[in-house]
Image (cartoon, grey):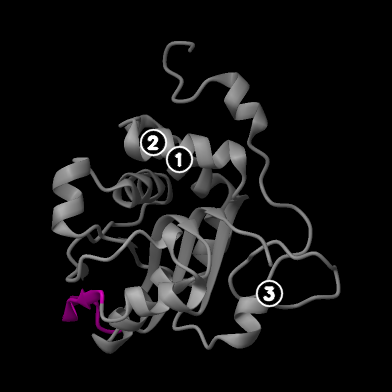
């Protein structure tokens, strides 16, 4: 890999941001131009206002994010945070975001992994956009099962009451940040906790987002 680069040029070339129609609420790529919302957002009343995913979740992103989280390639997170600012910076500013809140890991998982991937992405994003990152606004109080092993209904049950928010965010417009969005269960429960603590509006940014199924 060339000196000073966070990801090799070959891998960078394979990363294609989402183009075409998106869900107005969560930004999932849609199959038809005339669609306004994905199937999940048609059925679920989300706790967040709106969100943006940068890349479609496929084989390339799956491998890259796996290396980032489990291969301890933290430079990947910086790279993705900077790309988030490049592709979504104008949108984030239009939302009036004042603070960035990374989705927290439970203490046990944090001890095992050694870092929170969402925080690394959030800090790189915040550095580029000049926004503070608040790692104390949200705490994961429940150790949950890995979401990838569960169906949509199980995911929502798994994440219920998983988060606790600080009242320091009263009235704030916040941006939640994570690596992957599938059904939105994690974002919903995190946004709900923040709003219960008094947050005004909650938006989100993720690096990879699943398609409409």
Residue 151 point in image, percent of width and height: 49, 70
Sequence order check, earlier mark of 3 and 1:
3
Residue 58 in which image quadrant: top right
Q: Nearer the viewer, residue 23 or 159?
A: 159
- Decide: is 40 above or below 150: below
Residue tagged by mark 1? Answer: 65
Q: Is residue 177 left or right of residue 33?
A: left
Under tag 2, what secondary structure?
Answer: helix
Q: Point out residue 43 in the picture as x, y percentages from the top left corner.
A: 61, 86
Q: CA distance from mark 2 to mark 3?
A: 28 Å
Q: Earlier in the sequence, mark 2 or mark 3?
A: 3
Image location of residue 16, percent across then percent down: 68, 40
Query: Vertical placement of 147 versus 77: above or below?
Result: below
Q: Residue at x 59, y 28 (%)?
A: 12
- Which is nearer the eye, 138 or 198? 138
Seen as rendered, the residue at the extreme top is 2
Task: Say above or below: 176 vs 207.
Answer: below
Q: Residue at point 50% right, 83% down?
A: 46
The residue labelled by disc 3 is 38
The location of residue 81, given as percent across then percent down, is 44, 44
Image quarter where the C terminus lies is bottom right
* Image marks 2 and 1: residues in contact by CB distance under 8 Å: yes
Q: Read off the magenta span.
A: 162-171
Instruction: Say which residue label 2 marks.
Output: 68
Identify which residue, 6 or 64, lies in the foreground. Answer: 64
Element assignment for label 1: helix
Q: Residue at x 59, y 50 (%)?
A: 57
What is the distance, in whole Å, between disc 2 and disc 1 at their CAs? 5 Å
Front residue of 208 and 71 = 71
């Amino acid at each position: 890999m060339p000196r000073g680069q966070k990801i090799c040029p070959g891998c960078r070339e394979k990363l294609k941001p989402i183009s075409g129609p998106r869900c107005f609420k969560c930004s999932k790529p849609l199959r038809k131009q005339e669609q306004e919302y994905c199937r999940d957002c048609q059925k679920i009343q989300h706790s967040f206002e709106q969100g943006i995913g940068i890349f479609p979740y496929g084989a390339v992103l799956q491998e890259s994010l796996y290396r980032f989280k489990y291969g301890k390639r933290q430079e990947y997170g910086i790279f993705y945070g900077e790309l988030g600012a490049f592709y979504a910076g104008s949108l984030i500013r239009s939302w009036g975001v004042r603070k960035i809140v990374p989705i927290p890991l439970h203490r046990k998982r944090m001890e095992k992994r050694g870092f929170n991937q969402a925080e690394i992405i959030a800090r790189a994003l915040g550095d580029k956009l000049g926004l503070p990152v608040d790692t104390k606004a949200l705490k994961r109080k429940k150790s949950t099962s890995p979401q990838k092993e569960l169906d949509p209904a199980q995911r929502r049950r798994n994440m219920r009451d998983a988060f606790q928010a600080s009242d320091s965010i009263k009235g704030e417009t916040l941006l939640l940040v994570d690596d992957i969005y599938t059904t939105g269960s994690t974002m919903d429960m995190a946004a709900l906790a923040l709003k219960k603590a008094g947050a005004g509006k909650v938006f989100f940014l993720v690096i990879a987002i699943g398609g409409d199924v």
